[in-house]
């Protein structure tokens, strides 16, 4: 058989923030090889699989990943040698077994994920299939609604902008992915002109969105609605808004500290705050509206808003099938974010997505704020038919790498391609 893993090598490369990350290459017995790179978050959930860093202050301030490279080449590679690269489950189970810890702290989730992704890609190449078709089969034909993070705040803008980390444009009214991408870019540029006119900064945050020093979180939504109109579209009909406040980052001493507005809200007040935003702006999706340590209050949030918008858990679920199962049981949200490196293998990411989908929940695929030009998540989104993904602004190479790959997939699918549009969202979302 010539689909066996022959060798695996790894190297330390830089991500979009100038921090080291891991790149992995898998070589097969037939001479083919494939590559993958691992992303890295800034606003991370405490239950995420562990991203291992060297801690040697003399290299990258302790953020180096040479130890991870060593784990891949010296521990993982010999063990995976001669496994059939098409057996993703066996590969991932071997990786999990080799690490042996619950949170992948021993070898590092960054070591495991790089190998897992590179193997999936090598297997697809071996089968002479595009990655989305290899992972998703012949039914993988639906293109997702791209959610463009055009206003960056919170930690992604070093608290120079809004408290809320992400304000996204959601062009669900477009007829195709290509059209949605054009709309996103046009609205992004309209927003830039509005900011310039208002003498607000057009400097960008980690995900390529602008990071103006707004006076309130509401000002962000006014800017988005104006930009949608300025570009010639109708807010609510053509394009909605999604928000990721990443609220765990400003939940301190049991209160949500809104720095820009100089006030602190209780969980119940925070839910009312969102209800007011939802009543006044075309918001269709709210991610991490409440903190990961505020599980009980999520029930209230879901009671009040779960019937009209998609409520996504990110830091609180960490793409972990066990936590998502508990969340479904407790009925605290109606959707989960999906991030490969929060859980650490491709198989577990698929399991988390399926868990959500089988229960009528949404699954929202996401990049990380520290990215590379690896476009794996574009294919993954189509393969798992999640209907929507976020990959930052429609600008900056590491963000558009994913959007541009989706253009290629749409083109390749030809007449078979469909665009998820409003159906991308969980049932009940009011448009
Ligand atoms: O909170 C998020 O959803 C992400 C991605 O946008 O940010 P980070 O990668 O910093 O966790
Ligand atoms: Mg988030």
Image (cartoon, rainbow, N blue to C red):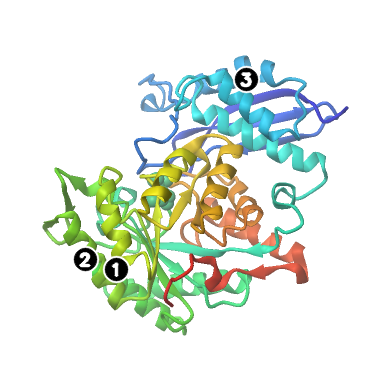
Q: In the rendering, at what x and y percent does residue 84 appear?
A: 77, 28
**In the image, which disc is placed on residue 267?**
none
Q: Of tags 2 and 3, which is closer to the observer?
A: 2
Label 1: element kind: helix
Q: Nearer the viewer, mark 1 or mark 3?
A: 3
Q: Is residue 69 above or below residue 316?
A: above
| Residue shown at the point (32%, 76%) measured from the top left | 281
How far apart, in angstroms, are the residues tagged by discs 2 and 3? 49 Å
Question: Does residue 78 appear to the left or right of 153 in the view shown?
Answer: right
The label shown at residue 220 is 1
- In front: 426, or 376? 426
Answer yes or no: is residue 174 visible. Answer: yes
- In terms of sequence position, does the residue under pointer 1 or pointer 3 come before the other? 3
Name the residue that disc number 3 marks.
Answer: 76
Near mark 1 (Cα within 10 A), the count class, few <14, some 14-19 or many ≥20, is many
**Residue 303: quadrant of the picture:** bottom left
Indicate the secondary structure of the residue bearing disc 2: helix
Element assignment for label 3: helix
Observer-nearest of 194 and 350: 350
Residue at the disc numbered 2: 273
Q: In front here: 163 or 208? A: 163
Q: How much space separates mark 1 and mark 2, taking CA atoms?
A: 15 Å
Determine the residue located farthest toward the front in the rendered image.
Answer: 329
Q: CA distance from mark 1 to mark 3?
A: 46 Å
């Amino acid at each position: 058989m010539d689909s066996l893993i022959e060798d695996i090598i790894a190297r330390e490369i830089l991500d979009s923030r100038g921090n080291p990350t891991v790149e992995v290459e898998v070589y097969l017995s037939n001479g083919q090889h494939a590559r993958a790179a691992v992303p890295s978050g800034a606003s991370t959930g405490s239950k995420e699989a562990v991203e291992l860093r060297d801690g040697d202050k003399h290299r990258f301030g302790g953020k180096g990943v040479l130890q991870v490279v060593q784990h891949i080449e010296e521990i993982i590679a010999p063990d995976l040698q001669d496994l059939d690269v098409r057996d993703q489950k066996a590969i991932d189970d071997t990786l999990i077994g080799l690490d042996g810890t619950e949170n992948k702290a021993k070898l590092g989730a960054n070591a495991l994920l790089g190998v897992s992704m590179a193997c999936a890609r090598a297997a697809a190449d071996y089968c002479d299939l595009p990655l989305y078709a290899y992972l998703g089969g012949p039914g993988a034909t639906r293109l997702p609604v791209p959610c463009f993070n055009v206003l960056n705040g919170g930690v992604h803008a070093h608290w120079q902008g809004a408290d809320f980390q992400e304000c996204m444009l959601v062009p669900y009214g477009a007829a195709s992915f290509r059209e949605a991408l054009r709309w996103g870019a046009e609205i992004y540029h309209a927003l830039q002109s509005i900011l310039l006119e208002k003498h607000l900064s057009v400097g960008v945050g980690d995900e390529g969105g602008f990071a103006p020093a707004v006076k309130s979180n509401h000002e962000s939504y006014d800017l988005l609605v104006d930009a949608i109109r300025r570009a010639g579209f109708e807010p609510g009909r053509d394009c909605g808004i999604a928000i990721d406040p990443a609220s765990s980052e400003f939940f301190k001493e049991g209160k949500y500290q809104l720095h820009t507005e100089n006030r602190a809200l209780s969980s119940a007040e925070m839910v009312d705050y969102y209800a007011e935003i939802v009543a006044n702006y075309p918001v269709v999706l709210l991610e991490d509206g409440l903190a990961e340590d505020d599980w009980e209050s999520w029930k209230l949030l879901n009671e009040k808003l779960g019937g009209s918008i998609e409520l996504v858990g990110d830091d609180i679920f960490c793409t972990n099938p066990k936590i998502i199962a508990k969340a479904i049981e407790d009925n605290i949200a109606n959707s989960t974010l999906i991030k490969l490196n929060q859980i650490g293998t491709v198989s577990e990411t698929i399991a988390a997505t399926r868990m959500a989908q089988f229960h009528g929940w949404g699954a929202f695929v996401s990049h990380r704020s520290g990215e590379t030009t690896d476009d794996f998540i574009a294919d993954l989104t189509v393969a798992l038919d999640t209907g929507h993904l976020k990959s930052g602004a429609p600008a900056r190479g590491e963000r558009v790498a994913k959007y541009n790959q989706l253009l290629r997939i749409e083109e390749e699918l030809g007449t078979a391609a469909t665009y998820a549009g409003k159906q991308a969202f969980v049932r009940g979302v009011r448009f």
